[in-house]
Image: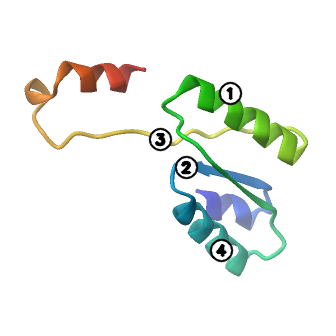
Amino acid sequence: LALRLAKYNAELCLVARREDKLIELKNEILAQYSNVKVHVITGDVSEESECKRIISKSVEEMNGLDVLILNAGIGCLVRLDEVPESDLSQCQR
C-alpha cells in the first residue's frame, strides 16, 4: 500500500515495531520514488499510549495528517475454541 501511495507522491509515515523492517521498506520506496518524503516511527500500536505518541509525532514531522490508514493485526493458527481467552481479549482491544 505504501508503494502505491508513493507512486502518487504521497508523503508517508511508516509505523511498525521493527525499525529494520521500516528502514527496508523506506529504502524500497525511495529506490522507486526518490522524490517522496518517507518518515519512519517505531512503536507498538497495541498500546494506547503508543498510538497517541505515534500520531503526535507523525503530525509534528509531517506538519499535519490528512489520511490515516491502519493495517495492524494479530493471528492465531489454531481452532477458535483452542484460543486462550487472554488472546481473544487482545484481539478485541
- Marks 4 and 1 sit apart, C-alpha to C-alpha, by 26 Å
Residue at (57, 24) in percent of width and height? 48
> Would you say 58 lies left or right of 73 here?
right
Q: How is the image coloured?
A: rainbow
Looking at the image, tell me whether mark 4 or mark 1 is earlier in sequence order.
Answer: 4
Image quadrant in which you'd find residue 84: top left
56 with respect to 16 (left or right):
right
Residue beneath the point at 55% across and 49% down: 16
Looking at numbered disc 2 in the image, what kind of residue is underneath it? Ala
Mark 1 falls on what kind of element? Answer: helix
Do the residues under discs 2 and 4 have CB atoms within 8 angstroms? no
First of labels 3, 2 by sequence position: 2
Q: What residue does disc 1 label?
A: 52
Return the residue at label 2: 16
Q: Residues within 10 Å of mark 1 (few under 14, many from 20)?
A: few
Q: Which residue is mark 4?
A: 27
What's the amino acid at mark 4? Asn
Looking at the image, tell me whether mark 1 or mark 3 is earlier in sequence order: 1
* Mark before the other along the chain sequence, 3 or 4: 4
**Mark in front: 1 vs 3:** 1
Q: Are marks 3 and 4 in contact (CB under 8 Å)?
A: no
